Amino acid sequence: MDVVKERGELKCGVNDNLTGFGVVMPDGSFEGFDIDYCKAIAAAILGDSSKVEYVPLTASARFTALGSGEIDVLIRNTTWTASRDRELAQDFTATTFYDGQGMMVYADSGYKTIEDMSGATVCVLQGTTTELNLDDRFTKSGIPYTPLTFETNDPLQAAFEEKRCDGWTTDKSGLASKRAEFPASAGGPDALVVLAETLSKEPLGPLTRDNDSEFYDVVQWVVFGMMQAEESGINSSNVSSMAANPKDPGMARLLGVGFDGGEVQDFQFGIPKDFMQKVISQVGNYGEVYDRHLVPLGLTREGSFNALWTDGGLIYAPPFR
Amino acid sequence: MFRTFIFQNFIDWIDRISFLRKRKTRRISFQLLFLGFLGLIIWYFVSKALQLDLGFSHLNSRAGFGLSHTFFIDYSSNDSRWKAYFTGVINTIRICSLGILLTTILGTIMGVARLSSNFLISRISALYIEILRNTPLLVQIVFWQIVFLKLPQISNAITTGGYTAISNRGILIPWIEANPKFDIFFAIVVIAILISIFLKVFLNRREEEKGQKLYSNFIPLIMFFGISLLGLLFTGIPFNWNIPSVAQNEFGTYMQSGGFELSPEFLALLFALVLYTGTFVTEIVRGSIQSLPKGQTEAALALGFSSYQRIILVILPQALRSIIPPLTNQYLNLTKNSSLAVVIAYPDLFMVTRTIINNSGHALPMFFVVLFTYLSLSLIISLIMNLLNRQVTKVRV
């Protein structure tokens, strides 16, 4: 963490080709759900959400980049698994998005379930849990299939557009964003359907290196703080008035201010006590980030795992105290 | 004067007794110091590496991922990671061996064509070199992938009279399969080869003794084909045709089967590697031919050789001496460049290993495995080419 402070910039490993999560805009800036978490961490540590250097990474190169210290934190729609946590010596901080693997096929193919896809060729990215889940699913049902394994999304999409493969499997969030921007020349979004079946649990979230617990805690609690902010009804437009006049002691602790003129509770994260104020004013709370990037893709929040726990979802932050 | 004398004696005395001042001592001590330093560095890296898990035991566990191209090895996701790795090695060997063969043919033809007196032929060769040598290989690979993806989709596969199935899922050509008669036929062919070799040796000896032409190539060749043909008549046709077909299964998935499959990924990689490396081989062939004295061509012309005889009997055998060493480099380049397969979903050695790394996390030992495998492949190619070179340069000129 001292390295980040000294450098004055957070190096954040991201996806540059997944609409909604991480994508390069025409002017070269980055935008997306994952990108906003990079901004939030930079706002918490450095006080300025623009002090981020984005490092676009492929699925297969991302862990090496984090392990070698090329980046400080990896926020690139990465699934939390036991082997990654342990074998790769990296730590998952918290789940920002509960995803699941899906299968996208052409609407005119007549496939209704994965059981129909006997003998099909499926396009998949290399070095992902997706590749392994795909095999588990087809092996379980004893269905023959051919995986076509690509390193990056662009040649994969080129192959899928030419119907080199019958199906395209990745996280449903990814499929939704790819479907939304499917070129009209290849039939547009309506030519595709995402099958209802979910092949796997895919909790996505930021990762840090093992044995960097100070930095790990900051990343983790920035994520929790954004969830807690939504739960408490604090958003980017009312955060300054809430900080000036917190409604209850819990809110005061979250925003790093004293309640009713009292003392400020210091969680000793090694960063300014009011870090959540900066995060919320510059980036927003969890709901704002979700609405900004994922709702336009058609990933509705109500009724999904990504709703707040008070609304029946799984978005739940441990208490700030 | 006296002091100089004393001083000189002192130095002599020091020189005699102090081995520290000896030049040899200094040399050795510097080298020891250097070796010690080198040893420290190596020790540091080794001790660092030992902290990592350098075991290969994880290669015994279940692979859990499928591969699109399995050739020769019957691999499924239930097999071990070792088997997945060997499937990758076979895929690499497959692309490299075919690539090297085609590159050599293409390069030789283009190299000779480059020197042709026919303006059109030599320009075509020059154009080929300048375009393909000056564009990046990676770009060419992706270009060929897109070209092959533009083949008809499988629902409209081209089936020329039911004998092929050409689509962007793969080009399937009719292939032969051995049937039970094959064993007998094979034995007859082996006998035919042995008889032909014997005949060839015999005729060569007679030619040398008598000094008259006895058609030492032609007669054994006729003999070989004659015996083989007789064998064929005796056994009947020992092969069955394996005709490719495309059909929909009960769920509407188009399935291709039969024949010999050339997938678009394999073809794209093969085309790119052969065309790219071919330009360098062309230049090597051209350079080697041009380095021969002009008198060789003129002598061949004066002896009344045809242009075919001139190239095959006089020019190429001499040019081979200077072709082979740089040609080896190009073969090695082709082998190493085949690792770019990962871009277009051809599961070669490097791609499979990277998948294993991603699943297991044992990056360092697996990279050692990859490096070792490529090194072995390269050394084998070098060995073969060196043996060939020794053959070619046996006769001194």
Image (cartoon, rainbow, N blue to C red):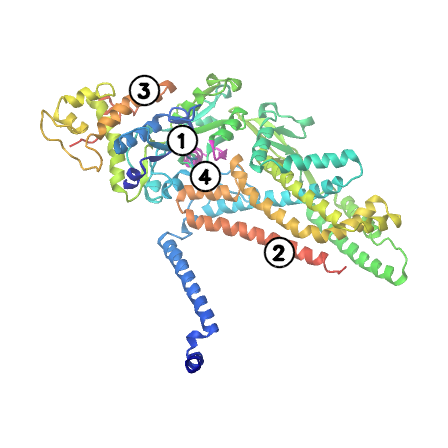
Looking at the picture, how far across and down is residue B228, in whole percent?
77, 48
Numbered circle sitting on residue A291: 3
Numbered circle sitting on residue A15: 1
Magenta segment: does it hold A150?
yes
- Give the residue pinned by disc 2: B383
Q: Chain of mark 1?
A: A
Tell me the kind of residue under disc 4.
Answer: Phe
Tell me the kind of residue under disc 3.
Answer: Asp
Question: Are the residues under badges 3 and 2 in a single subunit?
Answer: no
Q: From mark 3 to mark 2, how far is it between C-alphas? A: 63 Å
- What stretch of residues is rendered in magenta? A131-152
**Which of disc 4 and disc 2 is earlier in sequence?**
4
Q: Is residue A269 above or below residue A113?
A: below
Q: From mark 1 to mark 4, how far is it between C-alphas? A: 24 Å
Any part of residue A287 in sight: yes
Q: Are marks 2 and 1 in contact (CB under 8 Å)?
A: no
Q: From mark 2 to mark 4, how far is it between C-alphas? A: 35 Å
Any part of residue B78 in sight: no
